């Protein structure tokens, strides 16, 4: 989260009441310090106190809205960002990005479009600095990401709009023109191509996106590796397009990064289950290969169920499908032999990719 800008100092008029011992600037600085230590509730208190002093202060409104998003107080956040729009409708794209994320269907599209327009205008006034980490490239990436979000809306909530397909193509073409080396663009393109039943083109888009980041360090700041959630979504597309080797490669990286995410373990289990079904029956070791894949699947799916309960997840479809897969595996392999749980409750995986696949 970015830092909040200081507001202009207001001078006290002669004869007015004594100034408080703190200013809006002081309160926003305190909010920033609280954010640095992830104390979002404390930061929110400082931001709201600043708004009590100056209800129309743009910096305080944006601060309150941003913090409320972190606290999942979306109604309050939306109201504060709408006030920002009234005060400053023709500059400052961030508030429109927030509003787009908190809105639905065509309303979300409208907010994203306003933000994109402002970002494009701001980018046009910048020198074309292609140095890694430059403001120009960072803004280009934000524009591309917003266009991908707009495409996703037309793929889902607005899929029945008469211009849905043409809008998806327009946004994708614009995103690629602005930022041709962003993996998210090609992942979004693959989703569009799958919706059009153009599977080969979807595979080509996924391969092109993977080539931009696969093998890079996921911990590198501003590196090319997509964030964790984006890679989870990528695995689903890879499985849907039968790109199993690539799916396992991405999954192995996710598990190495964090093996305590129910969705990751579910996808790892599901991928192994699919791999068991795809074993070449003509192979002399087909039975052994199938059993190994199903055992890998069962281990990951059991861990998924435990984590689902431990994290108090509410994703019932994921749990239901996980349990269905486990029941099917039991029918094939028989009941699982009880084993002593590994200390700490974590599942250990082999480092060798071949062992995992």
Image: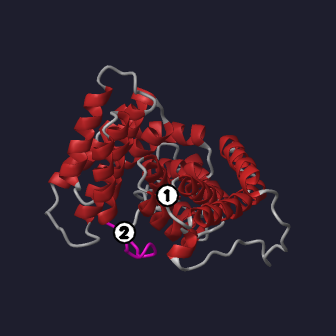
Which quadrant of the figure has residue 217?
bottom left
Crowding near the residue tagged with mark 2, few <14, some 14–19, many ≥20 C-alpha atoms within 10 Å: some
Q: Tell me if 352 is positioned left or right of 243 in this view.
A: right
The disc placed on residue 118 is none
Does residue 251 lie above or below 90 as drawn?
A: below
Crowding near the residue tagged with mark 1, few <14, some 14–19, many ≥20 C-alpha atoms within 10 Å: some
Count of marks overlaid on the render: 2
Does residue 334 lie above or below 112 as drawn?
A: below
Q: Earlier in the sequence, mark 1 or mark 2?
A: 2
Q: Tell me if 262 is positioned left or right of 2 in this view.
A: right
Q: In terms of depth relative to the viewer, which is nearer, 136 or 256?
A: 256
Q: Does the magenta run of residues contain 217?
A: yes
Image coordinates of residue 78 in percent, x first then y, are: 52, 38
In magenta, the rendered stretch is 212-221
| Residue beneath disc 1 | 280
**Which residue is found at the position 35% from the left and 32% from the top?**
110
Q: Tell me if 38 is positioned left or right of 120 in this view.
A: right
**Could you tell me what secondary structure mostly forms the magenta stretch?**
loop
Image coordinates of residue 139 in percent, x first then y, are: 28, 57
Q: In terms of depth relative to the viewer, which is nearer, 21 or 152?
A: 152
Image coordinates of residue 274 in percent, x first then y, are: 55, 53
Does residue 106 lie above or below 251 as drawn?
A: above
Q: Secondary structure at mark 2?
A: loop
Q: In terms of depth relative to the viewer, which is nearer, 118 or 260?
A: 260
| Residue beneath disc 2 | 214
Image coordinates of residue 162 in percent, x first then y, are: 32, 19
Q: Secondary structure at mark 1?
A: loop
Viewer can see residue 13: no
- C-alpha distance separating marks 1 and 2: 28 Å
Residues at discs 1 and 2 in contact (Cβ within 8 Å): no
**Which residue is found at the position 43% from the left and 39% from the top?**
100
């Amino acid at each position: 989260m970015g830092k909040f800008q200081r507001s202009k100092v207001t001078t006290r008029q002669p004869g007015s009441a004594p100034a408080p011992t703190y200013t809006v600037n002081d309160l926003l600085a305190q909010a920033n310090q609280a954010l640095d230590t992830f104390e979002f509730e404390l930061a929110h208190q400082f931001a709201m106190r600043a708004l009590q002093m100056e209800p129309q202060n743009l910096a305080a409104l944006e601060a309150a809205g941003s913090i409320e998003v972190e606290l999942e107080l979306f109604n309050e956040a939306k109201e504060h960002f709408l006030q920002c729009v009234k005060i400053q409708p023709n500059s400052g794209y961030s508030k429109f990005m927030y509003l787009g994320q908190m809105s639905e269907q065509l309303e979300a599209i409208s907010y994203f479009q306003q933000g994109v327009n402002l970002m494009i205008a701001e980018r046009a006034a910048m020198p074309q600095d292609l140095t890694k980490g430059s403001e120009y490239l960072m803004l280009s990436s934000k524009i591309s990401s917003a266009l991908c979000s707009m495409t996703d809306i037309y793929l889902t909530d607005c899929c029945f709009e008469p211009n849905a397909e043409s809008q998806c193509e327009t946004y994708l073409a614009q995103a690629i023109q602005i930022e041709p080396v962003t993996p998210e663009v090609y992942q979004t393109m693959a989703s569009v191509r799958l919706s059009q039943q153009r599977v080969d083109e979807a595979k080509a888009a996924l391969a092109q996106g993977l080539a931009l980041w696969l093998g890079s360090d996921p911990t590198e700041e501003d590196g090319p590796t997509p964030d964790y959630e984006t890679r989870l979504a990528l695995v689903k597309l890879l499985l849907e397009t039968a790109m199993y080797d690539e799916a396992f490669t991405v999954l192995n990286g996710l598990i190495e990064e964090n093996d305590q995410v129910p969705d990751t373990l579910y996808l790892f289990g599901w991928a192994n289950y699919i791999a068991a079904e795809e074993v070449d029956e003509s192979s002399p070791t087909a039975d052994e290969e199938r059993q190994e894949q199903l055992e890998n699947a069962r281990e990951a799916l059991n861990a998924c169920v435990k984590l689902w309960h431990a994290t108090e997840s509410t994703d019932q479809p994921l749990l239901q499908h996980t349990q269905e897969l486990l029941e099917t595996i039991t029918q094939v392999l028989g009941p699982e032999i009880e084993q002593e749980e590994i200390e700490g409750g974590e599942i250990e995986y082999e480092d060798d990719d071949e062992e995992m696949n």
